Image (tube, rainbow, N blue to C red):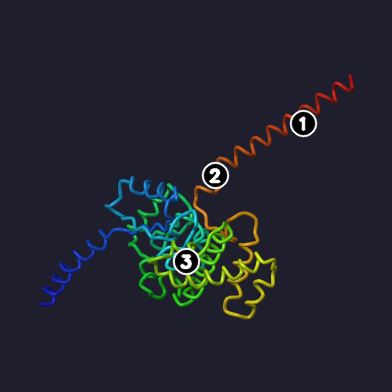
Amino acid sequence: MKKYLIGLLAVLLIPMMVFAKDEKVKVYIFEAGGCPYCEMELEYLEGLDSYNEKFVVVKKELYVDHNDWAPGEDFIVGAKTALAFNDAGFSNAGYNGTPFVVISDLYASASYSTSLESVINEAYEKGDKDVVGCISAGKNKCLEDYVDADYEKEAQEALEQTITGQISACLKSGGDSSCTDIYKDTRHAKKAEELYDLSKDIYTCVQDGGDTECASEYADSDNEDLAYIAYQTIISAGNTQTSTPIDASKKISPVAIVVVVLSSLVVLGLLIAGAIHLNKEEKN
């Protein structure tokens, strides 16, 4: 009887082990609508031989688009994920850049990369921890020493600050109440309307010749930080937010940096050679 039970247990466990091994890894891409490098990242991933065999791609809307940078439906999840990975030592994780790619508990970076296959294979061999799925479900300890409640408030604050900056930039560039249109029918609609009123108040004050007093009226209130973000955005040069999210296409390419450095060295060399030549002529 004992041998029979052991044999039955082994038979039951083998399919479970096979199933666990065959479970596909979820590769998350937090993107902004129209972000060119987000599309390139997706094209790279879908071109890998292991696509749909070892992994699938799950797209998340971090920003509605990469022009206005209005927070998307998945902004809170993206911010909490970035904060959690930051605390776990992933310095490149961030919700202020797209594409923000997350693979299990092994990779989290707000940058475009074509070197993810080995990470995906490792996640497949070890088993996908699906940190984003865990955070989305509101669970705790999705990463080592991670506690969801630690980041909920920070993520909400990041959302409010980003919306305030985006609406203030819109007002500064000549917008009106339509600055909130991008949030219609989204979970951020009510919050956007509230922050539009605050931003409009600051904008009107500045237009009437006000200065820092426009924001200081909110001192010691729950909206003090947001008022200063609105004020700084409205008085800053250009029409961008104080902290504008970026996509990878706007980052300086390492190749471009090398070209600039080499060009500078060539110019410097020519100047030195010219100076030496002039010095010889003067001596002659």
Amino acid type for the residue under numbered disc 2: Ser
- Crowd class of label 1 (few under 14; some 14 to 19; many from 20; radius 10 Å): few
Q: Name the residue under label 1.
A: 272
- Crowd class of label 2 (few under 14; some 14 to 19; many from 20; radius 10 Å): few
Q: Which of marks 1 and 3 is nearer the N terminus?
A: 3
Q: Report, in whole angstroms, how far the alpha carbon at label 2 lies from the one at label 1.
A: 29 Å
Q: Name the residue under label 3.
A: 79
Mark 1 secondary-structure assignment: helix
* Residue at figure coordinates x 89%, y 22% from the top left: 283
Q: Residue 233: where, in percent of width, then height?
A: 61, 62
Q: Which quadrant of the rendered structure holds the N terminus?
A: bottom left
Amino acid type for the residue under numbered disc 3: Ala
Q: Which of marks 2 and 3 is nearer the N terminus?
A: 3
Q: Which of marks 2 and 1 is nearer the N terminus?
A: 2
Q: Is residue 125 above or below residue 39?
A: below
Residue 116 versus residue 126: which sits nearer the camera? 116
Amino acid type for the residue under numbered disc 1: Ile
Query: Horizontally, is 118 left or right of 95 in the view?
Result: left
- Crowd class of label 3 (few under 14; some 14 to 19; many from 20; radius 10 Å): many
* Residue at figure coordinates x 49%, y 57% from the top left: 68
Q: Name the residue under label 2.
A: 253
